[in-house]
Image: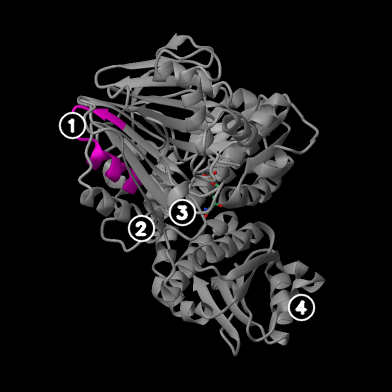
Amino acid sequence: MCGIVGAVSAKDSTPFLLKGLATLEYRGYDSAGLALLTSDGVSGLQRARSKGRVAELATLVKQQTFSGNIGIAHTRWATHGVPAERNAHPHISGKLALVHNGIIENYESLREQLQGLGYVFTSDTDTETIVHLIQACFKGLIGEPAENLFSAVQCAVVHLKGAFALAVISEEEPDCLVVAREGSPLMLGVAEDGYYAASDASALLSVTKRMMYLENGDVARLSRDAVLVVDGIGQMVERAIVTSSLNANAVELGDYSHYMQKEIFEQPQALSNTLEMISGAGQLQPGIFGAEAAEIFQQVDSVLILACGTSSYAGMTAKYWIEQVAGIPCNVEIASEYRYRQSVPNPDQLVVVISQSGETADTLAALHHAKVQGHNCTLAICNVPESAIMRETALRFITRAGPEIGVASTKAFTTQLSALFLLTLLLAKVKQRLSAEDEKVYLDELRHLPIAVDKVLALEPSIEKWAQHFSNKQHALFLGRGRHYPIALEGALKLKEITYIHAEAYPAGELKHGPLALVDSEMPVVVVAPNDEMLEKLKANMQEVSARGGQLYVFADGGSAMKPTEGVNVQLMPEHYGLLSPVLHVVALQLLSYHVALVKGTDVDKPRNLAKSVTVE
Ligand code: AGP
């Protein structure tokens, strides 16, 4: 989704801004722009915007020989107004230029008010409202005239409803950059040669690892050698400087063709890192979820999982584990629904929010909603230690997948599953449903998981052969049963995200209640079919497909006794993996989608219309 970078530096900020935008490309965007000022104020406001890639913007900036110590830049993911140069940020009002992430909910009424004051709008965006609003505050057309840019921004943000992170510069104050945040992420970089700002820590790594995370309501003034922060009630505050644990190399592509490919193949390492704390452990300690975990796990009588997209499918898989192994009820809700639904709160329920980014607006809002409803037993499972979600729950678990850049989530999902399996075991243990013997068996299986995933990755050449069969299809069905139904859902999501083939997933028993009508010889049907307690039922469902001419692509394993026949393609998984078999099967489905996308030539890492971190509703 949209990305912001900003700088007040002793040197030319242009290279940092362009590099920062390139780092943020993975979030998804459709236009980009920047604005620069020199600290001597001589060259005035310079702005370049382009519809398309950051590389095109870089060419434009080079042609126009732009430079400046102070600058702001932006990648835009269209919400209000089509992707077009006129809608790209920065937006200008008089001598002010501004970039913004988020959505201003009351922009229509503000726009009317500002038009009434004589402001002329040149874009369809909600963002342009903010820059005119700051100008109006500056001039005293709204409220008392502001003394400077900093107070004008403080005055303006009070009138904004919605979520925002913004950065603004003024030709009249060519020594500073003012930023503000409410709801959308924004952090500052503290470097030798100046202060920097970004909506994502990875964009700051080229200049510093020392970061200051702004809180909701904060407005900050950055100059070459100082930063001043005030909070939502206008009081001066100090925000701690932390050293980011992110590694700049971790976001490099290296020898891989795509981030998605890199991230699929990083899964054994990502799982080892995530499970490091159990590498030599004879038994599990609740403390891996936080200091209060033992007490909270003891108290809770059920689990409610809130998440979006792939993360919600991790939650759905965990529901099968938690109910079977820990013996307590578990519900999974799509965060965007839960946040607006009148539910029946239970203070003894453990609310688990799962998010790769930790910044997904709906998941954060669902967590806030749960807390307002009286849920205090909260746990975040997240891949970004410094993210908003991690600061808002009683318990937390960091999946150590490393930065995930590809829009299609892969290693985040499998590490989430490993974390959720640990949670299952701990809940079972606390509820006295786990014998010491079983605990040891499950721990051994978890420890062996990276090796088992490695063996699935070795199947790539034979999975790749199937890709041709999908590339000219318009539709595909994915089937699974039990804990593999969410894996079918995730497989279908991967395929539609990166290949644009319409894919649906069903619990196979539902076929004859409707979707079977879709099946003919043109319909590829992918089946997740390990040798588990549902296999015989699943085989009967596969017969239903075969009888209608459907083409089956079955991911089975040793004990399933399945052989390829006319219309039935079988890929045997290297080993059967019991309760953890969803982790292995999803890796095979990731590889399938990846190779179909390669055949189709789609943009694997940045599929159309999608963003990596969905920071707006
Ligand atoms: C996954 O491939 C998707 N891009 C998407 O569904 C994603 O999982 C969802 O937006 C949730 O993101 P989060 O895990 O960062 O909260």
Mark 3 is on which residue type? Answer: Ala
Mark 2 is on which residue type? Answer: Lys
Q: Point out residue 38 in the picture as x, y percentages from the top left corner.
A: 23, 30
Q: Is residue 426 visible?
A: no
Q: CA distance from mark 4 to mark 3?
A: 42 Å
Q: Point out residue 416 in the picture as x, y percentages from the top left corner.
A: 52, 46
Mark 1 is on which residue type? Answer: Lys
Q: CA distance from mark 3 to mark 1?
A: 31 Å
Image disc number at residue 11: 1
Q: Residue at x 23, y 42 (%)?
A: 66
Answer above or below: position of 154 versus 568: above
Q: Is residue 443 left or right of residue 191?
A: right
Label 3 sits on residue: 84
Q: CA distance from mark 1 to mark 2?
A: 35 Å
Q: Which residues are magenta?
A: 7-23
Q: Residue at x 31, y 42 (%)?
A: 20
Q: Is residue 276 left or right of residue 583?
A: left
Dividing the picture into quadrants, the one containing residue 210 is top left
